[in-house]
Image (cartoon, grey):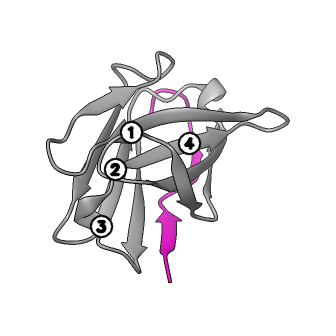
């Protein structure tokens, strides 16, 4: 049973930071690429960032590059997203997603999401 549980969301003011976590279970976490995807209110899904399983290759969407940092701790089966210099347009539900394999970002499982609201 694959399970992905996001945490760390909340209400923050513009310019502040927040770190999201995703606790994974039910599969060999170290063998799969992982991603963060978000959905703003009334908008479609936007892929945010992804990280490969072994070499650690990382990719970011242009909208978050330079502000967000994705990382993983395979020993703890946990994926992270450090979000700095948050903007109101970052407001969204953030989802943790498992990829089909060690590389590439086709997704087969998703968490329930955690809400991040950036507002003054």
Which label sits on residue 104?
A: 1
The CA distance from mark 1 to mark 3 is: 15 Å
Residue at image mark 3: 29
Rendered residue at 42%/26% (across/down): 85
Q: Compare marks 1 and 4 and give the one earlier in the sequence.
A: 4
The circle on residue 37 is 4
**Residue 113 location, x and y as percent?**
61, 59
Instruction: Judge depth for marks 1 and 3 and give the one in front.
Output: 1
The one nearer the camera, 50 or 113, is: 50
Badge number at residue 33? 2
For marks 4 and 3, give the CA distance: 18 Å
**10 Å neighbourhood of mark 1: few (<14), some, or many (≥20)?**
some
Pointer 2 local density, CA inside 10 Å: few below 14, some 14–19, many at least 20:
many
The residue lying toward the viewer, choosing from 55 and 15, is: 55
Task: Determine whether label 1 and label 2 are within 8 Å by CB.
Answer: yes
For marks 4 and 3, the one nearer the N-term is 3
Kindly state the secondary structure of the residue where label 1 is placed. Answer: loop
* Residue that protrudes farthest toward the right in the picture: 42
Q: Quadrant of the C terminus?
A: top right
Front label number (4 vs 2): 2
First-in-chain label (1 vs 2): 2
Q: Secondary structure at mark 4?
A: strand
Q: Nearer the viewer, mark 1 or mark 2?
A: 1
| Mark 3, other Cα within 10 Å: few <14 / some 14–19 / many ≥20 | many
Image-quadrant location for residue 38: top right
């Amino acid at each position: 049973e694959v399970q992905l549980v996001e945490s760390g969301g909340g209400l923050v003011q513009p310019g502040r930071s927040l770190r999201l976590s995703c606790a994974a279970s039910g599969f060999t976490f170290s063998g799969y690429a992982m991603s963060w995807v978000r959905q703003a209110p009334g908008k479609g899904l936007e892929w945010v960032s992804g990280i490969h399983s072994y070499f650690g290759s990382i990719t970011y969407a242009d909208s978050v590059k330079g502000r967000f940092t994705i990382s993983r701790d395979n020993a703890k089966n946990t994926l992270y997203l450090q979000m700095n210099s948050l903007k109101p347009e970052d407001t969204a539900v953030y989802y943790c997603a498992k990829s089909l394999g060690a590389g590439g970002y086709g997704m087969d499982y998703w968490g329930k999401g955690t809400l991040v609201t950036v507002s003054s």
